[in-house]
Structures are given as C-alpha cells and as structure tokens.
Amino acid sequence: MKKIFYLTFFCIVLFFEQVIAQPISSDTSKFKQKVFGNIYTGFYYRLNKNITPRQAFELSTALFGYQAEMGEKVRATLIYDVSRTTDDISVSDTSGQLMNVSYHKGSDYTAFLKQAQIDWSFAKDFELSAGQLLNQQYLTLQDKFWGYRYIVYTFQERYRFGSPADFGARISWNRKDKINFSIGVVNGDGAFNRQDSKGLMLYHTNLEIFPVKNLTVKFYFNICPDNNLPASMVYSAFVGYKADKWKLGAEYNQVTHPDFSSGKTYSGYSVYCSYKISEKTDILLRYDLIENSAYYKNNQYIIAGIQYLPVKNFFISINGRYLLPEDEPQVYINTGIKF
C-alpha cells in the first residue's frame, strides 16, 4: 500500500506542476460534437435437443452515445447502453431445497449509464480522466483487437472477470505507437452500484507496449484491499499481432480472491484470430479455456464463423459455437451496425 501511495503522490505533484504552467484557452472555434450508436442482434439454434430453450432472438447491445471536444485538450463522452441489470431471486428452505417464489423482476433490457467520462490533456502526452470510466482491463484494447463484439464479448466480460466501467479517476501517459501507461483509482463496485458501505477503493495500473510495428503487448493489474479480508486482485496479460489481412491475439486472465473469498481463484485463456479473404469477407476463430469462473469450471468454448459486410459499418455473421463438456453445439446468425 505504501508503494501505491508514493506513486499516486508523485503523479499528483507532476499533475499540478504541469497545470500551473498551462495558459487558459478561450478558443471555442474548435468545438466539435457527434452522436453515435451501436445495435447488435442475433438468433441462435441449439443442436442438442436436451438443452432449452433451443432457439431465440437476442439483443446484446443497444448503445447510444454523445461526444464533445472543447478544442484539442478537453473531451467529454456520455454513453447509455442496454443490458440486464437485475438478477433472478432464489430462496431455499433450511434443508437447502429451492422454494417457489412469486416476485416482479425488472426488465432484462434496462438502459444504464455505461460511460460519463471527461478527458483532459493537461500536458504533452499526459491525460487526466474522471467520471465513469471505461475499464482498461479489457474494453479499451482487447475488445477492439478482437473486433467482433456483436458476435460475442471478449473473455473477461463474458465470464465476468471484471466490470466494463466504474466511477473514479485515472492519469495516463501516452507515446503514440510506443507506450501507453496509466494508473487510477475507482470505487470498485462497477457500473451498476454506488460505493459500498466500507468505502473500499480499487487501484489499477495498465501498461501497453508496441515493440515493433503491428505488435502489441499489454499487462494489467488491479487490487482492492480490505483490512479484514484477503485483497481482491486481477492479473491480465495480452499479446496481439495485426497485419493487413490477418490478426492473432492471445490473453491470460486471473482473479485472485474474487469477492474477497479466501482460497478462491478464477483463471483462463483466450486465443483468437481472423483472416480477410476479400474486401468484405472475414473468417474468424476463437478458443476459450475457462479453468474456473463464477459459472464455469474446466470448460472450453469454441467459435468459428464467417463475417460479411454488405456496406460500411453493417456486419453479418454466421457462426458455430461449441461448449464443452456440456456438449452444447449452437448455430448463430448475428447482425451489427454502427452509426
């Protein structure tokens, strides 16, 4: 904890040193704004008749956003997304048997605040971000590298190794095509909850290196200490290579003491690749090994498919998926659009 304190103190001193030297700008001629959105839908059919429901339409994303740039140094981003924000209720008797419960559950498609972020480039190569921040654990790099979010989320989001966003602040040092480094602090309770009663904080650091052209190496770490329980920690490593027609990425992820549970660890690997066979057509392949998570243990998830782009920013994919050892083969048709 002392190292975290000293590092944070150093960054605060550097921050104010740079701020004092900056003149106040009144130029409003460079004000820019844009509205954007994403819609991701799908239909699946299960080939194993013993698993229900066998077929259904899905809506994984209905996102609406707004971004404003106040000159070259200040940017504000506001995003609302649609997701399931409520859980089913289960009640057991004293013997552990589930009981029938009558209740009204909230919508599975609730609009929630995904991002409300202010970015300020207060000095050359330095940026301060505050508000509800997108999580650098997987959303800002791996999600973009994978590139098929409308088909399926990346490993850490799909298996709930972290939250997509949280309330806090972050300082970043970015050297284009060389290195990106950031440290920050957030509540640690995710996008759907306010600060917990203990007032615990989650400290994180992210390092992205670009040693040669087209190659990216990333390391991420966070820790949420509790004086009375084991500290919850996340370790993540990623390496990816992207060429003109193909790309290959691999990552390892580990959560130690999830929910401050002693002796419990989540971990797993994900490897994904794609190849562009024409200007409008890609083939894709992904393999996940979930060693342990909240819902899976020693599972394998395989995805193989093809993507077609009828027009720019409109995507269609036919893909097959297989979950082991549950013997759950599926056929999916996914569509996505960005505007």
Image (cartoon, rainbow, N blue to C red):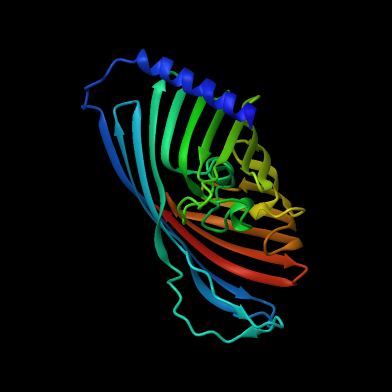
Q: Residue at x 48, y 68 (%)?
A: 86
Q: How many marks?
A: 0
Percent position of residue 169, x then y: 46, 36
Q: Which residue is at the front of the view, 318 or 165?
A: 165
> Which residue is found at the position 48% from the left and 33% from the top?
170
Return the x and y of residue 99 as percentages of the image width and height. 61, 85
- Tell me where residue 26 sits by quadrant: top left
Q: Work out whether 28 lies above or below 306.
A: above
* Residue 183 located left or right of residue 118: right
On screen, residue 300 versus residue 313, left or right, reads: right
Is there any visible trace of residue 154 in the rendered image?
Answer: no
Q: Quadrant of the N terminus?
A: top right
Q: Position of residue 53 (x, y in %)?
A: 59, 80
Q: Nearer the viewer, residue 204 or 300?
A: 204
Picture residue at 66% right of the left edge, 48% below the top: 228
Relative side of 162 to 25, left or right: right
Residue 159 appears left or right of 189: right
Foreground residue among 28 and 258: 258
Is 219 located above or below residue 199 in the figure? above
